Image (tube, rainbow, N blue to C red):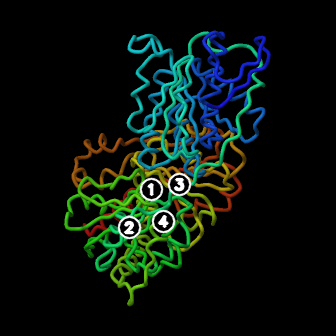
Amino acid sequence: MAGVVLEEEFGQSVVGFMNSEEPVEVVNEGLAFEVIQTCWGAGCREFVVCSGSRNSPLVLVLLSLQQKYAELKIWNFFEERSAAFFALGRSKISGIPTAVVTTSGTAVAELLPAVVEAHYADVSLILVTADRPDQFRYSGAPQTIDQVRLLKPYAEIFVDVCANDSSALEGLLPSGEVHCRWHINVCFDEPLVSGHDRKGMELCETPALGIPDVTVAGEELDLVKTFIADRRGLVVLSGGLPPGEQNQDLLKWLKQLACPIWAEASSGLRENDLLSDLIIRSGEKYFSKNKPSKILRIGDVPSLRFWRDLESLDGIEVLSIDPPGGYPGLGRSAAVANSKIFAVIEALPLKKLKGNIDLLDDRESWNDLLALLKKYPLSEPAWLCRLSLRIPAGSLVFLGNSMPIREWNLAASYEDRQLRCFASRGANGIDGQLSSFLGLSVNEDESWGLFGDLTTLYDMSAPWVMDQMKSGKRRYVVINNGGGRIFSHLPYLANLAEDEKRVTENRHQMNFQHWAAMWGLGYQQVEEVDEFVPGDIAKQESLVIELCPDLDQTEAFWRNLNGDV
């Protein structure tokens, strides 16, 4: 167990965890330190704090330690849901867990959407929740709810740390590695904190994080080898990939595999020159004309409608390599190989097939798509195409769920401009998108987030944290089309009456100018092409760009693309 040293404040130096003879407030602070030391041992260096009364021992110990350890970073939020999604963004881009620290009661419930996303996206996250003593449970006392079962099963590891006993923390790091979701629930009795000097607390040196096992199980290697032995009719679908997996080894392996590839922007493969002759550009059109016999999926669940159609296409075999969380991503039989993709590549070198992939129909469909973008320049997809060419090269780009991610994958330029694209595709929800974007953007010189209007309304408190962030240009592009227009693309909702659509699409007439002003952000509304001036945008530090597509042109674009005219 990690040690804690408290100086002579109470007449003696106390090494190790506080015993029950110590004043309650000293026990609380010792317990808080033990929890923070455990997070530190997991590699956590950032703590996103939502201060309250019950978690004050944790907050005050963190603040004291921050004065001694420069690498310990504290972010403070007033609202737990945004805080948790911000932490999710930090964990996603850093590859190491970030901790969220909350008070007791319903504050803990606000963590659920983010930990659901983290679970299905396989992003590390530590949730530290303060609680009242365990004897208050199931009593209905103020600030007392069932925190023990609240976040299960999405926080796979739960530790209940009761007052006077930190033994539950032992064994959390048997190999010095963490790559999952922890929920550490800590019970504090009153009085909660003391007025003594906490400077005597010292964090123990932590061992290097364990290196994950990268060997491939023999049966999984055989599964992949058999699956790709006959590559006729094989198509690769790549959703988002962690930055570390977007490497030359994967590119070369896919080149040798020599199969058509649908690559989402967040995969890092979509615009790569090495794969340009294999990349499917027409999306759904390709799959409407070509029925694969096998699908090899790598990365996140794809945003393609075709992926959902696979639910009923039992004749198409599907194999996912190292999918987030180990899930097949389909509600029917589909194979999974949980070995790391880079380990599979290393263990299964390929010889390039002779001949060329015939994507002539795909390229014709892509040219048809380009013609529609030109014909309807103010449609939503045309705006996404334009943005992909005007966002400064090398920027971080976050694609909010619903239409922005689908339209970018469909219409964005294939010119390799070194844009680094991210998305939250674990649970496919629109919760916390702006907060995740800000978490990803912390160390970036320029970042662009693309969000629907309802997605933005869901997360309007996200900019709270911007005053704590270093300088950097951040652009919130809010695509305001007056509601959730994605629902009109669903076959069973497309032909509803207008009064029904007002409800199903949550139609509105709001704009975001006053929201931008509330957070001290610049604001620009864009309806026409000549109103989008990159030079003017570049002059502003942080900016809300309210993009208002022409709804008639957008509808006409989709009708023409889908052959409904």
Residue type at the position of mark 3: Pro
The numbered dot on residue 143 is none
Q: Which residue is mark 4?
A: 343
Q: Tell me how far mark 4 sits from mark 2, CA to CA.
A: 10 Å
Judging by the rendered image, the residue that carries numbered circle 1 is 404
- Eyeballing the image, is 344 above or below 442? below
Residue 212 is tagged as 3
Q: Earlier in the sequence, mark 4 or mark 3?
A: 3
Of marks 1 and 4, which one's residue comes earlier in the chain?
4
Q: CA distance from mark 4 to mark 3?
A: 11 Å
Q: Which residue is mark 2?
A: 221
Q: Amino acid at mark 4?
A: Ala
The one of 236 and 188 positioned closer to us in this rendering = 188
Q: Secondary structure beneath disc 3? A: loop
Picture coordinates of residue 488, whole percent (x, y): 30, 53
Mark 1 or mark 3: which is in front? 3
Cβ–Cβ below 8 Å for labels 4 and 3? no
Work out whether residue 377 can be spotted.
no
Mark 2 is on which residue type? Leu
**Nearest to N terminus: mark 2 or mark 3:** 3
Name which residue lies at 60% across and 32% down: 77
